């Protein structure tokens, strides 16, 4: 029983960063029906910006929070610029073309990061009040991970409110459902598209900034992170935010269980689960059944 | 009719692109008897750029040091690329254009592909960082292949030799390793080596993580729980990961009391590049590799560290030493052979003593690896140090597992 | 002459002109290093043309094609001590990758569009991991050395000879694919790509078609992989990586996936651009990405647009029918 709780608690702690990272991507996909590879680069920029602002030093919660939010805002602006530069011009083209464009953008952004910050890795020291751990149900959980669960919940609720209670959210859902009809009804699709990228970018920057104290920060962070986020979004059902939540929880918990009960299989765990879900339900957990059309 | 024109146009319009193919290589090769170019193939872009620049800086210092008595050695650096076929291209561009003596390569897959090509084209390859034992045991990948790096399992055994001495009460060893054959075999060899020195440990718990993964919280949390009970002197954690993974592990482990409840944390991989990024925020740590800059107190090393620090702004890592050793080997062999002829150079490599910042090294006739003793260090993070790394103790262990002074 | 025989001859001439003529020129003027890189390019052309059966002909983007390329490479590498001639070796490589493609093809049959892309990516990664963790398959270092096997009893280790071996394989593959492209098979795949509902409504066996095209793409990829192991001299895990899978999709899209020779153009331009950028700068990915961005934004159908501009300029008079447009 102890071990069971350990696995579950571990899993929850793993799910939060997964969700934070994937939420923006899910949103972008939901509205633009396109995978944005450059999202990984935005995540990396969030981490780099935080480490640059704080110079890697340990600070208090408030300062750290401010740095993360600052980073998120800058990254949001970068994402907005990307939308104007690249995605707007590719609107209306085939989805694969937009994916190709976003991949090219990923290369460019990663190259710029390597030029600005150099190839040597950086680290961000952990925030002072959050650098310990607590014991829950027999499992040791890092205090920082609990904070991330909190942030994840806030982001999740915030996105729900945004999508269902604001005009922007309404327009987003309209464009997601049927862009041309939405346009015909007076929704400014271009502005909505730009807004989606900006908000998505901010989420990426936020996730990246929050991850800064956990990993060695190098230009390779982008590529490593994007694959993981892809999987969450696809399992959850492309475009579904609740799907991303459930997928994160599923993957986090499976990982937690594997670590506790079957550590030899952690490698295959995430891929095996993904393959299984997609074989059984190709549209993901919450995705709508797709027509035969590709 | 117009269709045939179309097809002809198709073939002809490819010509501009073919023109690119005519872009020849620089003809390298040596101007006079005592002027030689030595090639270096290392990553100059991508994930391992940092490693590559360390090797390169060490290599260039070696060539400068060897350019005495009328000899001039010029480095020529080519990008290793991210896949073996790109490394083969790099090797061909060097050896094919007359630069017969080549050092470098950090990835073992690249060494495996490049070594036979270098031999076939009539050159000599001294690898700096290829640590896969399969390249030289049981049989050499190529007669013209030499390797300055000691090899994955040698560092492992050297570390075990020292740990057995310093922590004789160890009985439980947690394993955190990458999920691949070296990661799975090293802990077993480590345990056996400890056992031979009279220290019997259980490998428990064992975690093998995917190489691409970066989040280790779940494993660390479980490990912290499993290793919390008992006298710290009886427990340790062995890391068989490299590069950024060690850094990420130490960062993520700092939240738990894991590192306080064990007496030994360490692993057989280059420590300095990763640890110096932590700005002094890491606990007592043990590592084994070819070199550590403050572990040796000789005038040669002092000069090396000084020259390197002036060039790169930071002290040299084990990779820098490897770059130096490889460059120094080829330069010394060319001098001894009186020229760059590959057979003569290869014969010389097996005979000469090669100068390095830590003393002279020799290549073994059978394995073509060096007899340079592994360096085991005990370090701790100290923000008051310039690079955040404070050396507590250093040891040297030879290829037979015995301590040397 | 019947219509079909004339078509056969015309396609044979086209393939020979497009492949053999430039190959002869290249062989004559390229340096030793240039020939090595061109050999790699031609192998990528084979790989890309096979992949384009999925990406361009069927509109099904698989992000795991490297799995078949790598299977072909490892098959050849595993047999390296048997001293089999290339005729046998390459057939075995093709068989091995076809079997893997058949297995995964059956499993992924239900997925379409992006889901198909993701599930092929995941299976590709699983295969990569299985090989990477396996000591018997060389783990991270790979299997080596892989010597170039004989062709028609002749030793082909010389790079220039091997170049011609690879070009010959391309000629055969290109001819076979060219025939298929304009056959009812190719046209049906195009129908399936452009309007799946109508295709199903017409009673065409859409699942069979998808499976066959998947196995075909995998088999050609395996052939390219078998040649690549001999080119590189080893089989390494990077031949199974997601990076390679993405790379080959990029090449297909770049060149123009709706044109028969688009994949070839993409392979040539992309490989050489990357080669030259790598020797000129340490920020290769940055410039490559910028180049790609420009191409993607300015040329919606890939490099094929440049092709159009060239032929329009060369053609003197009235336009030929649409069918001829499509054929290139």
Image (tube, coloured by chain):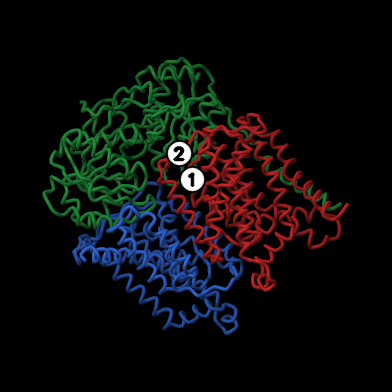
Chain colours: A blue, B green, C red
Answer left or right for C178 relative to B143. Answer: right
* Mark 2 secondary-structure assignment: helix
Residue receiving disc 2: B109
> Label 1 vs label 2: CA separation?
9 Å
Q: Where is residue A238 in the image (x, y as percent from the top left)?
A: 48, 70
Answer left or right for B91 relative to B252. Answer: right
Query: Quadrant of the rendered structure where residue C256 is?
Result: bottom right
* Residue lying at 43% horizontally and 69% vertically, measured from the top left: A236
* Residue lying at 49% horizontally and 49% vertically, measured from the top left: C241
Q: Does the CB distance between marks 1 and 2 fall below 8 Å?
A: yes
Q: Position of residue B65 (x, y in %)?
A: 38, 24
Q: Disc 1 is attached to a residue of which chain?
A: C
Seen as rendered, the residue at the extreme right is: C1
Query: Quadrant of the rendered structure where residue C40 is?
Result: top right
Query: Quadrant of the rendered structure where residue C26 is?
Result: top right
* Mark 1 secondary-structure assignment: helix
Residue receiving disc 1: C238
Please name whichever residue, C97 or B177, is drawn nearer the observer in this view of the structure: C97
Please name whichever residue, B175 or C135, is drawn nearer the observer in this view of the structure: C135
């Amino acid at each position: 029983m102890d071990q069971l709780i350990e696995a579950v608690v571990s899993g929850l702690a793993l799910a939060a960063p997964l969700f934070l990272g994937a939420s923006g991507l899910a949103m972008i996909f939901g509205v633009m029906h396109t995978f944005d590879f450059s999202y990984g680069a935005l995540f990396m920029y969030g981490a780099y910006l935080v480490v640059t602002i704080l110079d890697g030093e340990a600070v208090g919660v408030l300062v750290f929070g401010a740095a993360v939010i600052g980073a998120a805002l800058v990254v949001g602006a970068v994402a907005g610029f990307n939308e104007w530069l690249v995605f707007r011009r590719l609107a209306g083209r085939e989805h694969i073309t937009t994916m190709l464009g976003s991949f090219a953008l990923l290369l460019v952004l990663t190259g710029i990061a390597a030029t600005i910050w150099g190839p040597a890795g950086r680290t961000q020291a952990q925030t002072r009040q959050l650098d310990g751990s607590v014991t829950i149900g027999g499992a040791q959980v890092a205090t920082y991970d609990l904070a991330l669960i909190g942030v994840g919940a806030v982001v999740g609720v915030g996105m729900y409110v945004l999508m269902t209670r604001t005009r922007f959210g309404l327009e987003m859902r309209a464009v997601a459902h049927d862009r041309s009809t939405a346009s015909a009804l007076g929704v400014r699709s271009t502005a909505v598209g730009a807004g989606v990228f900006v908000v998505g970018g901010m989420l990426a920057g936020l996730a990246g900034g929050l991850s800064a104290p956990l990993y060695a920060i190098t230009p390779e962070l982008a590529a490593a992170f994007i694959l993981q986020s892809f999987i969450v979004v696809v399992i959850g059902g492309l475009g579904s935010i609740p799907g991303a939540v459930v997928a994160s929880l599923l993957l986090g918990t499976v990982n937690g269980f594997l670590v506790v009960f079957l550590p030899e299989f952690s490698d295959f765990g995430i891929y095996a689960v993904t393959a299984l879900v997609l074989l059984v339900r190709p549209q993901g957990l919450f995705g709508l059944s797709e027509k035969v059309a590709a | 009719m117009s269709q045939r024109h179309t097809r002809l146009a198709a073939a002809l319009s490819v010509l501009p692109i073919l023109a690119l193919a005519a872009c020849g290589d620089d003809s390298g090769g040596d101007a006079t008897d005592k002027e030689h170019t030595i090639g270096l193939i290392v990553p100059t872009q991508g994930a391992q750029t940092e490693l590559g620049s360390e090797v390169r800086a060490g290599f260039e210092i070696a060539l400068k040091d060897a350019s005495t008595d009328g000899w001039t050695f010029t480095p020529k650096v080519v990008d290793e690329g991210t896949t073996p076929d790109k490394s083969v291209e790099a090797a061909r561009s060097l050896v094919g254009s007359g630069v017969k003596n080549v050092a470098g390569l950090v990835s073992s897959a690249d060494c495996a592909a490049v070594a036979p090509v270098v031999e076939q084209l009539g050159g000599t390859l001294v690898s700096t960082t290829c640590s896969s034992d399969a390249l030289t045991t049981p049989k050499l990948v190529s007669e013209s292949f030499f390797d300055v790096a000691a090899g994955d399992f040698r560092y492992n055994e050297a570390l075990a030799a020292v740990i057995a001495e310093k922590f004789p009460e160890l009985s439980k060893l947690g394993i955190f390793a990458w999920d691949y054959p070296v990661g799975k075999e090293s802990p077993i060899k480590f345990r056996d080596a400890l056992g031979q020195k009279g220290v019997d440990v259980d490998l428990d718990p064992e975690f093998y993580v995917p190489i691409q993964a970066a989040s280790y919280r779940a494993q660390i949390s479980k490990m912290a729980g499993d290793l919390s009970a008992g006298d710290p002197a009886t427990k340790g954690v062995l890391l068989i990961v490299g590069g950024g993974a060690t850094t990420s592990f130490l960062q993520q482990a700092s939240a738990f009391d894991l590192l306080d409840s064990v007496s030994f944390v360490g692993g057989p991989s280059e420590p300095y590049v990763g640890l110096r990024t932590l700005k002094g925020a890491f606990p007592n740590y043990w590592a084994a590799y070819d070199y550590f800059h403050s572990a040796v107190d000789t005038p040669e090393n002092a000069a090396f560290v000084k020259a390197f620090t002036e060039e790169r702004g930071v002290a040299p890592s084990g990779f820098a030493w490897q770059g130096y050793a490889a460059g120094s080997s080829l330069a010394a062999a060319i001098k001894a052979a009186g020229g760059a002829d590959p057979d003569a150079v290869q014969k010389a490599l097996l005979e000469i003593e090669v100068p390095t910042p830590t003393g002279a090294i020799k290549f073994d006739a059978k394995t073509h690896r060096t007899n340079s003793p592994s360096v085991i260090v005990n370090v701790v993070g100290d923000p008051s140090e310039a690079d955040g790394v404070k050396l507590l103790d250093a040891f040297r262990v030879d290829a037979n597992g015995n301590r040397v002074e | 002459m019947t219509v079909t025989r004339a078509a056969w001859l015309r396609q044979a001439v086209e393939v020979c002109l497009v492949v053999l003529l430039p190959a002869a020129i290249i062989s004559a003027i390229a340096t030793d290093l240039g020939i090595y890189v061109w050999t790699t390019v031609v192998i990528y052309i084979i790989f890309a043309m096979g992949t384009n059966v999925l990406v361009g002909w069927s509109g099904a983007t698989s992000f795991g094609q490297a799995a078949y390329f790598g299977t072909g490479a490892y098959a050849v590498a595993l047999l390296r001590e048997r001293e089999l001639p290339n005729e046998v070796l390459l057939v075995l490589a093709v068989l091995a990758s076809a079997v893997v493609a058949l297995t995964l093809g059956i499993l992924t049959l239900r997925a379409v569009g992006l889901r198909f892309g993701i599930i092929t990516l995941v299976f590709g990664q699983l295969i990569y991991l299985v090989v990477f963790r396996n000591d018997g398959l060389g783990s991270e270092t790979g299997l080596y050395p892989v010597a170039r096997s004989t062709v028609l009893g002749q030793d082909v280790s010389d790079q220039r000879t091997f170049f011609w071996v690879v070009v010959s394989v391309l000629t055969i593959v290109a001819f076979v694919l060219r025939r298929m492209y304009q056959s009812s098979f190719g046209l049906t795949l195009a129908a399936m790509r452009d309007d799946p509902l109508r295709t199903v409504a017409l009673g065409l066996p859409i699942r069979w078609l998808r499976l066959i095209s998947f196995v075909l793409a995998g088999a050609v990829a395996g052939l390219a992989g078998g040649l690549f192991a001999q080119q590189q001299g080893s089989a390494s895990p990077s031949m199974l990586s997601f990076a390679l899978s993405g790379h080959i999709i990029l090449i297909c899209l770049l060149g123009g996936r709706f044109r028969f020779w688009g994949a070839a153009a993409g392979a040539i331009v992309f490989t050489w651009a990357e080669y030259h950028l790598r020797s000129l700068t340490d920020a290769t990915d940055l410039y490559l990405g910028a180049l790609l961005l420009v191409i993607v934004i300015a040329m919606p159908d890939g490099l094929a647009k440049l092709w159009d501009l060239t032929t329009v300029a060369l053609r003197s008079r009235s336009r030929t029918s649409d069918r001829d447009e499509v054929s290139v």
